[in-house]
Amino acid sequence: MHSEKEDKRYMQMALKLAARGFGTVEPNPMVGCVIVKSNQIIGKGFHKKFGAPHAEFNAIADCKNLGAKPAGATMYITLEPCSHHGKTPPCTDAIIQAAPARVVVAVIDPSEHARGRGIGLMRNVGIKVDVGICGQQARLLNAGFLKFAETKRPWVILKWAQSLDGKLAPATGGARGEKWISNELSRKDVHTLRRSVQGILVGINTVIADDPMLTPRPPKGKKPVRVVLDANLKIPLTSRLLRTAESFGVIVVTGAESVRTNSAKAAKIEKKGAELVVVPTFDGKCDLKATLAELGDRGIAQLLVEGGAGVITSFLAGGFADAARIYFAPKILGRAGSVSITESLVKLSKVVHLHHVSCAEFDGDICVSGLFNKLKG
């Protein structure tokens, strides 16, 4: 019998393993598994790639490769094992066949096909199951997956880079022709983040000013759909987003009146392979609640918002943001800087707190990540 301290230690190992799947397993959750017998780790595994074997299968296979038998062991799993047939067989069946004496689960899967079913099946055959060890850490790891499973609405991550004086970009490319605020390592981290989401959203002003591609680089692997908030249907037909719509996917969110009065342009946009999504508009802006509902209906579980100051402020003011990732570059741009995120954010009517904050350094840039709501646990 393991003590609570030992349970936490092994579960934390499983959580570290699970985190290695970031950027490759989504929209599936990151899951890790550690199998312990006679105080020795005899197997471990994690979910490596979307559609590939799950953590439990990999950990059981690891036991076999090491010549160990999981029967009578304790399995530590960061998320309730699946009990349905999807891209892979049910993990619960594999666990029951492996016959551990005890399974420790960090958090229950709230998905419609789960919700304690896997735990119930294991208990029905006599396996002791304990739930809740390192629960908050497990919820934090898969916060996006868990929210979508519970609400069918995307987990919204706000991302921006700024100088120390709150500027989002050099006004004219900077004195040395600098295009970005953040450095190369920070931008590499952003591309990893892009691979972990199913949608990347910007406002129409960003499209007109920067003509972005919004694709992860290198352009291999998963392709999140690009989303543009464009209430008045201003998107240039020659934009790189529309030119690559068939290859990477584009959703243009707009208003009914704009589609009616610009029917010819709307038809051309759809002909290029983009999808037009009509939502209510107010004061020339797309309704964000309706937008998120439409994106959720299209299976976008995690949405990265890379818009400018106005879009970021709208998500914060409306309470639609779940998380933030902010890159602070050690620069003061002064008059050489463009739009100030600081001036836009001061319009917020209340204090917005970040919880579960973590920091990372990328060659001098400081990245601050956190959630706008505190998780239970």
Image (tube, rainbow, N blue to C red):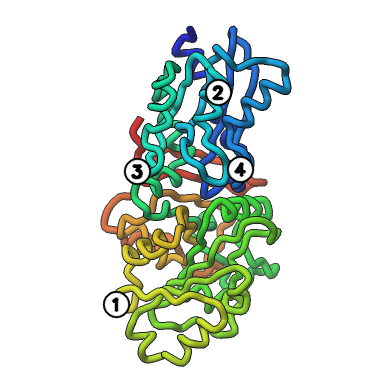
* Residue beneath disc 1: 283
Q: Examine the rendered structure and indicate whether residue 206 appears above or below residue 103.
A: below
Q: Is residue 16 visible?
A: no
**Mark 3 or 1 closer to N-term?**
1
Q: Measure the alpha-carbon separation of dots 3 and 4.
A: 24 Å
Kindly identify the amino acid type of the residue bearing the numbered disc 1: Asp
Q: Quadrant of the C terminus?
A: top left
* Residue beneath disc 4: 361
Q: Residue at x 40, y 59 (%)?
A: 296
**Mark 2 or 4 closer to N-term?**
2
- Left or right: 349, with 57 as reference point: left
Task: List x then y, in percent, for residue 313.
Answer: 37, 62
Q: Measure the alpha-carbon separation of dots 3 and 1.
A: 28 Å
* Residue beneath disc 3: 373
**Mark 2 or 1 closer to N-term?**
2
Q: Secondary structure at mark 4?
A: strand
Q: Measure the alpha-carbon separation of dots 2 and 1.
A: 60 Å
* Residue beneath disc 2: 97
**Mark 3 or 2 closer to N-term?**
2
Q: Measure the alpha-carbon separation of dots 1 and 4.
A: 40 Å
Task: List x then y, in percent, for residue 12.
Answer: 53, 25
Mark 1, mark 4: which one is toward the viewer? 1
Q: Give whichever of 160, 301 is nearer the camera.
A: 301
